[in-house]
Amino acid sequence: MKLWCDKKETDQLMRLRLFELHENFLAYKVVFFVVSKRKPVDMIRNNLCLLNSSRILSAKTM
């Protein structure tokens, strides 16, 4: 499992999360908003990728 994602891949993963994990999307949005006040967007992107990479990889293999 790689521990980084490029921007294009991360954008696809965020879209995947939007459609497949509806029920959690509002929570993600709130966290994203709160964290974005403190960190650059690229760092947030990287953190989201790290936090969700294992879940998304398991979703891809199904």
Image: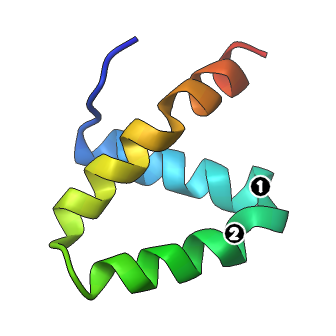
Check if mark 2's residue and mark 1's residue have beta carbons within 8 Å: yes
Q: Mark 2 points at which residue?
A: 25
Relative to 22, 16 lies left or right? left
**Closer-to-camera residue (51/5):** 51
* Residue type marked 1: Leu
Q: Residue 10 location in percent, x, y? A: 38, 46
Could you tell me residue 6's position as x and y percent? Answer: 24, 39
Distance from Cα at disc 2 to Cα at disc 1: 6 Å
Residue 54 image offset from top left, x and y in percent: 55, 25
- At 35% from the left edge and 76% from the top edge, which residue is drawn? 35
Q: Residue furthest right?
A: 23
User: Which residue lies at the image location 77% right of the left edge and 55% below the top edge?
Assistant: 21
* Quarter-of-image position of residue 28: bottom right
Mark 2 crowd level (few <14, some 14–19, many ≥20, 10 Å Cα)? some
Image coordinates for residue 18, horizontal then vertical, percent? 67, 62
Q: What element carries label 2?
A: helix
